[in-house]
Amino acid sequence: MSVGDVAVRAAGVWKRYGGGLTQVDALAGVSADFGKGRFTAIMGPSGSGKSTLLHCLAGLDKPSDGKVFLGDVDLTTLPEKQLTHLRRDRIGFVFQAFNLVPTLSALENITLPLDLAGRKPDQDWMTTVVDTIGLMDRLRHKPSELSGGQQQRVACARALVSRPDVVFADEPTGNLDSRSSGDVLDFLHRSVREFNQTVVMVTHDPTAASYADRVLFLADGQLQSELVDPTAETVLDAMKQLETQQDTADELAG
Amino acid sequence: MFKLGLRSVLAHRLRFVLCTLAVTLGVAFAGGAMVFTDSLSTALKKNFAVSTAEVTVTPTSPIETGTDRPATFQIDLVDRIAAVPGVAAAVPQLLVSNVQILGPDGKLLENYGLTSFGAAWPRDPGAAPFKLVDGTAPWGGDQLALDESTASRAGYHVGDQVRIVTPARAVTATLTATTTPAQAGAAAGAPLVSFDGATAQLLLLGKPGWTSITVSLKPGSDANTVSKAIGDTIGDSVTVRTAKQVTTDGEHDLDNTFGGFGTVLLLFAGLALFVGGFLIVNTFAMVVAQRSRELAMLRAIGASRGQITGTVLAESVIIGFVGATLGLLVGIGVAAGIRFGYELLDLRIPTASLQVTPTTIIASYVIGIGVTVAAAAPAARRAGKLPPVAAMRDDVHVPERSLLVRLLIGAFMLLMAVLFFGIGVSTGGLPGAVLITLGTGTAVLAIVMLNPIISRYVVRALMYPFGRKAPVTLGRRNAERNPRRTSATASALMISVGLISGLLVIGASVKASIDKSMVDALGTAEILITNDGTPSFSTEVGDRTAKIPGVQAVQRVRQQSGEVGRANVQVTGVSDGTLAGPVTTTFDAGSAAALDAGQALIPRNLAKTLKLTVGKPFDLKTTSGTHRLTVGGIVAPNRQLNAVVVSLPTYATLGGSPSDNLLYVEVAKGNQVAQVRTGILDQLRKDYPTLQVRDQEAYAAVAREPVNGVLIAVGFLLAMAILIALLGIVNTLALGVVERTREIGLLRAIGMDRPQLSRMLRVESIAITLLGAFLGLAIGVAFATAVQSAMVDDGLAVRDIPVLQLVIAVVLAVVFGVLAAVWPSRRAARLDVLQAIASE
């Protein structure tokens, strides 16, 4: 993959918590490229550091060591204000829950990053995004009047509305039933296929991961393996293998 | 349950501190007032009790009189009382509070609010109200004595020349003695000048007379028996009191005097607590909302409703207790500070240690805890109603009473308020103003009830000019999202702003009315001469003024107080030409000519109240007794003649003393007013340093001056209420930040920068502030306008709405709103984005 095709790059990223005897390495030298127009899933058992990696990639958290590039911008050296504006203009977010501001309508929530930047939305793109989430008739509703699945789809639309360089999704289907999950994942998938967006998603659900082009497996803060063009079955197998490896490692260590 | 309450207090220091501060301020006002008045009156009472003559006789005055013009009697009374069985000695005393002492620099000595007295040197030192410290008793017109404290304050020593001014004349005399009070009472601690008896009568009364007789008893006589005997012998014309009665009466007077001051402080304490109450109501509503899941969990594991209500109330008891304790301490500190200030000025006010009575302590705690618990009660009750199943639900809503009930009660009260206003304006006068005040109180309560319903629309309208940028919209929506909370916060400010704007409008109207009535009343009287300190001055001033070049004529005005029916009136004697030009008068009936016939002119109000018409007789009571007068004319409302007006000869027959209170000077044609004024000053200032010679403009300004003083004093106290209201806004914002931590995290994650976050909170704060300021302004201006309409004929003829000042008040409110947001936004900006998103 050439540099021009990379949306986000992690280079030897470490994240340490605490110090001395209680020091814990949440990330221990992770290097990875996330290609433009690609849908990448990050998987791993709980405590593997997958969420920490996402936060570092998204500029929400600073790595203890190593570098993170968005395009050719080094996020690790960016001051707070620029980092905030970069998140606003070039990154989209979908969290597991509580994605929307309760005082704003669905539409206002979607345009919020643009409003904060003081920019006008691109009407054609707006229509495309809103059409795709299929909530045209519910745009004036407040988040409390929408179902969980609808709320997540609004969050996805908000993440995409500014045509960000990359969308980060942190367990976006964690709180949803399977049908709503399908809707949200379909939408993310289509945004990559049809609109050439870049999505990086953390998940622990093999079905969700199967929507991605590529799956990275993380354990103990290190990249273990990766899978291209995954299916739910291959992901599940890879996960099982990972657990076995880990059990063996634990036994050897113990 | 108490333990849970305590834990909750300790876990949330922020809301605890703000709530406690509100209670502290209120209790400090109340406690300070009680400690101060108790201390002062105890100190004065102690002096009362130690030394008063066994029996005191004073002439009975038909009307209430001040110490500056007490009723007097002639010396023969002394002999008659001395003859009463059981009386060992009867000594006449003369004590009048109408002397002014000048310092060595020739200027009036600053007395820090104390009244200075003039007295006759006692014939019998044993019964004297003061005793010699140094020197020899004054004798004759060129000798006087001063009390030690005043002498040392002014820097006078025995042998120095001292200048004083009395209503009779200005005197320069040799200081022959210094004195110290032997006996408390009216003159204790006050500046005191004394002369020999004859000189005192001449200078202080302008005629022979005495003001009281101190009686000592023969051994074995009983005070009560003797005083009864004196009463029986002399009759109703004197009042006889034993030492004990004098003490009781004096204490009663003192209680009344300080009671008034205490009442004002207590009123502000009430206001502070009322405004603070909103803060507490809000805090507890939020506390219960935040802890609802925890409380429901307690219910689920077996806590009863009462126990849940109990934990919340326990928290309020703790806050009330701590607030009351701190408030009491602050109050004692303030009272001590005032006392220390008096000591610094060396005023020799009799001091006792600070009196912190059990009543004060109990009252402070009852007030502090009572208000806090009462304010927390609604939230506690709602907490008790939380269903246990709420513990399992995701989003918990604390049950709240429906807004419909509020709407109905509020609308009904608003209707009542409108009724009160209507009746008040049409009734007019003071009763009308009282009705309007009641109506305003009702309107305030109505708006407090309706506010949660209307606030959304008012906020939207008021915030329109701030645009629709994302942080602005978010801030405004945050202010709208919990109408009860927003309106409770704004209501506290509304009350303060309402009082201030009402005060501003009424103050401005009073000043404008004074100006207008002054212009209306003063005709050719270009220059007005009055005296500072004591109201009346020597007739010599008028005599000499008349001879000054450029003076056309001088008219004299003399004043004393009287009663007609049960109404207190001013009795004014005017010289012949006064109504012919210097004072502009409009007669409803009769004319000025009636004065020459010994008849009286009365103001329209009095004629209306007493149903008097021209030619009818009426009884006027003055210090010298009851006099029958005939109505010779009825005068339309007039600032200079709002009194029973008689000619100078008639005035003398009413017992008035021959000294002037006011001179109207007419300037001869072709002369400059300013020049003539300078001429008068050059001639008279040397002998009468306290004379005030003013042109009409300056005279009106002096009449306006007290209004400014009152405005500033009340404004200062109201500022305290605003401070508490602002604490409420800080509280609401800060608790909002805590409550919305996750939302703030989300906003920061998707790209809201810190300035935008601050702006969002600032807008919320401004929205609340504007809501309160706007409603307060509306209520305050409506109240003041209605009062002015009702009192058009009672001194508030002109309505003046000081737009600029009101605009400044609102702008200040917004500035304070911005300031209130500073600390909460700093807290919000410091939140770590990741932790905020992850928080529950």
Image: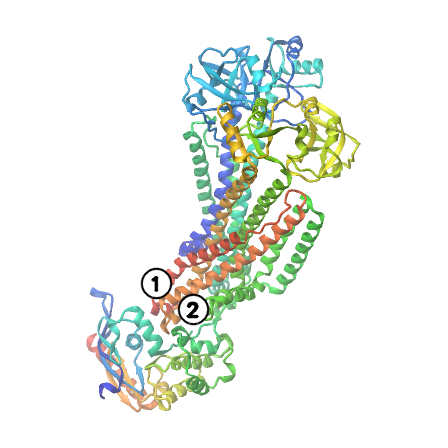
Query: Residue most toward the right?
Result: B615
Task: Identify the disc placed on residue B830.
Answer: 1
Q: Quadrant of residue A64?
A: bottom left
Q: Tag 1, which secondary structure?
A: helix
Does residue B840 appear in this view? no
Residue hosting label 2: B471
Q: At which x and y percent is residue B140? A: 52, 11
B136 left or right, relative to B239: left
- Residue B819's place in the image compared with B461, above or below, is above
- Residue B465's place in the image compared with B446, above or below, is below
Q: At which x and y percent is residue A108? A: 46, 76
Q: Amino acid at mark 2?
A: Pro
- Which of these two is toward me, B170 or B664? B664
Kindly identify the residue that appears in the image at 50 percent across and 65 percent down. B463
Does residue B588 appear in this view? yes
- Residue A134's place in the image compared with B16, above or below, is below
Alpha carbon separation for disc pair 2 and 1: 18 Å
